[in-house]
Each structure stands twice: as C-alpha cells, then as structure tokens.
Image (cartoon, rainbow, N blue to C red):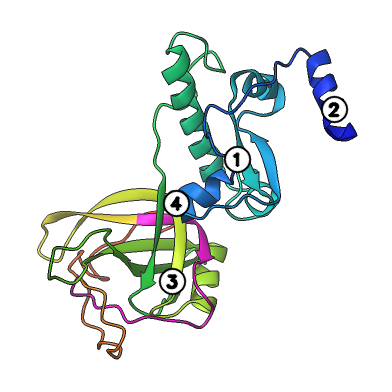
C-alpha cells in the first residue's frame, strides 16, 4: 500500500469515517461510462462521493460513492461537479440504493427526502435535418431540431425502426449545435422532458413533448454522417440521403411554441 493511501486511510479513521465499499456499483469502473455510454473504463479512476460537503462522511460510511474516470469526474460536460442533471441522477440512484438497504425511516440526509421527483433524459441519435439557429424577441438564441433513435429490437425479417424525438437547445448549446452538427451527425444529449399545451390553427387543443437539452456532445467522428429516413426506419448504408419530407405533425412550426420560463420561442 502506497504511503499516500495509508495516510488517507489513517486520516479518515481519525475523523471517525468507517471505510465501506460502494453500494451503488460492484465493479471498479467508471459508472457514467458504463451507464450512459455502455463503455467499460477502468483506467485513471477517481472516487466520487455522491453526497459531499458536510455529508461526505455520510457517503463514506454508507458506501454512497462511485468510481469515475477523470473526464466524468472533474472535466466540464457529463460530470457531477459541472452538470446538475448528472449530480441529481447520482443522488437519486444513491437514495434508492440506501433506502433499499436500510429502509425509508433511517434518516436519508437531509432529514426530509431530498428528491421527490425526477425528470432526466439521456438519448443518442442522428439529426434528421440541418439545425437552424433562431433568436427570440428577447434576443436569446434557440435551436429546435429532431433526432432519430434506433430501437433496440427489430421484428424478424423487418428493418429496425426508429423513434423521432424533438430537442430544444438554448443559448450557447444552440450555437454549438448549429456550428458543429449537420444532418446525419451522431449526437448524445442529456436534459429534461418538457410537455407544452397549445392550440393549432383550427383552435383544437394539442400537446407537444420535447427534450430540453442541458448538455450536447459529439457521439461520433466529426464530419461523419449516416442517412436517416423520417418514415421510421434507419436508411440502409448503401442508400443516398432521402429528400427531407415534412416531419410528423407535432403542430408545425407555425402552430406551436415551447415555452421557456423566461423567454418565448420564435416559432
């Protein structure tokens, strides 16, 4: 055992921290790489306590910690220290594991339940059209685009189907998408699901659902693209790009708008 590790263990014991294994994961690998990207990363791992600050000792005693690679621990992007959605996801998982082991009456910190509701979306797919940057009347940049996500199964003899999901990106995220992504680009997104009620041109009440992006990242090589058919199937690799048909009717660009808490979308 290295001297630094031994000193750390002795310091923890002096502070009354009982060392314990993680109750969240069994394998020593990056939790985020495995959960979100299905990749096993075992090098350069760093220990992350889900509850930190004054509750760090609670995390240590009860095994509320995970292994993370340096990128997902201390780098901007998909890191609990920079990404509130990621941090809340880990807290929700930790709370569920803690209460599964100890019950709901054993004082999850703080004394009241910290997470009563959860709205977290993580998706990966290809853009079905080139994104377009727009600006609200208040001068805020926004981009609404659609991605195609292949389903995990296909019926025998049939081509794999895809789901088409609308995404809203604001401010710097909107500028980032429009500058570096195009039709066919593979993109990884995490954010929250938002439903909005609106009236179409006939006055009928409708509901639209879209993902409001918190973080958008490259999921493939820059400049690579793959055909996507908006009919519900991923186009064969040998086919050229299909002509862009009008997207499925979600009310149309002129019919509805996704409302941000402080700004109105320009469509």
Judge whether 233 appears above or below 45 on screen. Answer: below
Callout 1 touching callout 2 (CB < 8 Å): no
Judge whether 227 appears above or below 253 on screen. Answer: below
Is disc 1 surrounded by few (<14), some (14 to 19) or many (20+) residues within 10 Å? Answer: some
Which residue is nearer to you in this view: 185 or 42? 42
Judge whether 39 appears above or below 107 on screen. Answer: below
Which residue is nearer to you in this view: 185 or 152? 152
Question: Which residue is farthest top?
Answer: 105
Query: In this figure, what is the number of numbered marks?
Result: 4
Instruction: List the residue tagged with mark 1.
Output: 28
Q: Quadrant of the N terminus?
A: top right
Q: Which mark is residue 191?
A: 4
Q: CA distance from mark 4 to mark 3?
A: 17 Å
Q: Which mark is residue 40?
A: none
Q: CA distance from mark 3 to mark 2?
A: 45 Å
Callout 4 touching callout 3 (CB < 8 Å): no
The percent coordinates of residue 107 (x first, y second) are 52, 11
Q: Tag 2 or tag 1, which sits nearer the N-term?
A: 2
Instruction: List the residue tagged with mark 2.
Output: 6
Q: Mark 3 vs mark 1: give the one in front.
A: 1
Q: CA distance from mark 2 to mark 4?
A: 40 Å
In magenta stretch: residue 109 = no
Is disc 3 surrounded by few (<14), some (14 to 19) or many (20+) residues within 10 Å? Answer: many
What residue lies at 42% left-to-right and 13% top-to-bottom? 104
Q: Which mark is residue 186?
A: 3
The magenta span reads 211-232
């Amino acid at each position: 055992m290295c001297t630094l590790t031994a000193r750390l263990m002795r310091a923890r014991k002096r502070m009354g921290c009982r060392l314990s294994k993680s109750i969240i994961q069994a394998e020593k690998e990056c939790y985020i790489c495995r959960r979100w990207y299905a990749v096993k990363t075992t090098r350069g791992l760093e220990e992350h306590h889900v509850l930190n600050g004054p509750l760090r000792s609670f995390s240590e005693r009860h095994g509320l910690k995970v292994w993370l690679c340096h990128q997902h621990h201390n780098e901007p992007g998909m890191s609990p220290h920079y990404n509130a959605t990621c941090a809340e996801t880990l807290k929700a998982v930790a709370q569920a594991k803690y209460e599964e082991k100890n019950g709901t009456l054993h004082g999850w910190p703080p004394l009241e339940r910290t997470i009563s509701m959860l709205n977290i979306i993580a998706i990966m797919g290809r853009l079905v059209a080139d994104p377009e940057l727009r600006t609200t009347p208040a001068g805020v940049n926004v981009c609404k685009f659609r991605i195609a996500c292949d389903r995990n199964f296909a019926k025998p003899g049939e081509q794999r189907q895809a789901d088409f999901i609308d995404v809203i990106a604001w401010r710097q995220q909107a500028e980032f998408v429009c500058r570096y992504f195009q039709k066919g680009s593979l993109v990884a997104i995490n954010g929250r699901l938002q439903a909005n009620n609106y009236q179409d041109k006939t006055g009928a009440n409708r509901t639209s659902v879209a993902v409001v992006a918190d973080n958008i990242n490259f999921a493939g090589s820059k400049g690579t693209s793959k055909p996507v058919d908006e009919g519900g199937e991923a186009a064969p690799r040998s086919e050229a790009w299909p002509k862009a048909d009008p997207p499925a009717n979600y009310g149309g660009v002129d019919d509805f708008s996704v409302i941000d808490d402080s700004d109105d979308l320009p469509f």
